[in-house]
Image (spheres, rainbow, N blue to C red):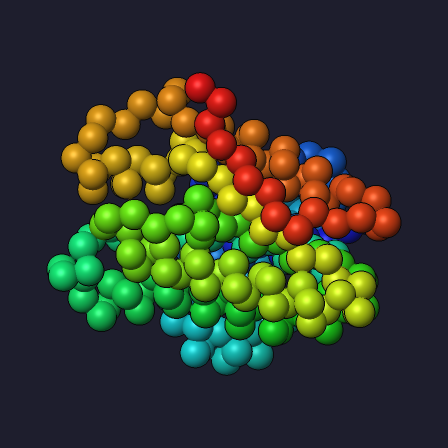
């Protein structure tokens, strides 16, 4: 039975992935930003373990994890959590830049560092849920896109470094997906939000599970998912 460490399991794509893996009987270790959120996740997914640490403060993750029991085995580490704050370069503050870089880039690097020994032992897989903004940047998306471009670089470097250890690394680039984050984006853009226009989180979850379940003789490096309507 595989063990998966998942960030962002509370909503959107992360929730869809966690639900699918839980339903098929895999073991889950669900990251939560605080104890209250951890309690909610544990109730939603009976039998799942939780791991508490604030991704917005990656400097303290090591301290937080030292007071908790980390799983002995990790078959996959799924980086799905993310934050976004749109704004023009002339308006964004250092606080906004740091928050997005911390959650979207530095925290995934720190989590990966902590779980690499278990991933190497299991010949496991790291999945980074990136964004179309990790490939192209547009007006008002500079900080978010920078964090996601950095996440692509992190994944590409990690793939080269860990190939010899049998660790697979996959990046998924979803287009706009119906989620609470997408609702926030529309609000910041001043547009009406119609979730039926965008990719369902379940569809992105299907692509992630495909990458996880691929036989060991192959790996998916980069997978782009776009709205079909």
Residue at point 84%, 50% (across, down): 216
In the picture, measured across the screen, residue 200 lies left or right of residue 96, that is right
- Residue 221 in the image, given as x and y percentages of width and height: 66, 51
- Residue 200 in the image, given as x and y percentages of width and height: 48, 28
In the picture, measured across the screen, residue 207 lies left or right of residue 151, that is right
Judged from this view, the residue extending furthest toward the left is 91
In the picture, measured across the screen, residue 41 lies left or right of residue 115, that is left
Residue at point 45%, 63% (across, down): 150
Decide which of 225, 128 is in the foreground and name it.
225
Q: Quadrant of residue 198?
A: top left
Residue at point 67%, 63% (across, down): 159
Answer above or below: position of 222 versus 66.
Answer: above
Answer above or below: position of 39 versus 176.
Answer: below
Q: Quadrant of residue 183?
A: top left
Task: State how many labels appear.
Answer: 0
Q: Quadrant of residue 213?
A: top right
Decide which of 197, 41 is in the foreground and name it.
197
Would you say residue 71 is visible in this rendering? Answer: no
Residue at point 45%, 69% (across, down): 106
In the picture, measured across the screen, residue 42 lies left or right of residue 217, that is left
- Residue 169 in the image, given as x and y percentages of width and height: 67, 57
Would you say residue 176 is visible in this rendering? Answer: yes
Quadrant of the drawing holding the C terminus: top left
Answer above or below: position of 217 versus 51.
Answer: above
- Residue 100 in the image, given as x and y percentages of width and height: 34, 61
């Amino acid at each position: 039975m595989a063990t998966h460490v998942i960030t962002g399991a509370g909503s959107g794509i992360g929730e869809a992935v966690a639900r699918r893996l839980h339903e098929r009987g895999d073991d889950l270790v669900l990251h939560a930003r605080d104890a209250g959120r951890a309690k909610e996740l544990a109730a939603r997914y009976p039998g799942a373990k939780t791991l508490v640490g604030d991704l917005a403060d990656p400097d303290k993750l090591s301290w937080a994890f030292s007071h908790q029991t980390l799983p002995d085995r990790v078959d996959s580490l799924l980086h799905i959590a993310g934050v976004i704050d749109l704004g023009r370069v002339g308006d964004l503050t250092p606080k906004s830049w740091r928050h997005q870089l911390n959650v979207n880039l530095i925290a995934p690097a720190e989590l990966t560092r902590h779980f690499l020994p278990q991933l190497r032992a299991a010949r496991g897989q790291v999945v980074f849920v990136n964004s179309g903004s990790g490939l192209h940047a547009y007006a008002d998306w500079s900080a978010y896109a920078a964090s996601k471009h950095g996440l692509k670089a992190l994944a590409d470097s990690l793939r080269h470094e860990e190939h010899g250890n049998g660790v697979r690394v996959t990046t998924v680039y979803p287009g706009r997906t119906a989620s609470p984050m997408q609702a926030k984006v529309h609000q910041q853009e001043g547009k009406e939000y119609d979730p039926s226009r965008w990719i369902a989180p379940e569809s992105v979850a299907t692509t992630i599970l495909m990458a996880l379940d691929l036989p060991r003789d192959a790996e998916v490096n980069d997978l782009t998912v776009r709205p079909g309507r």
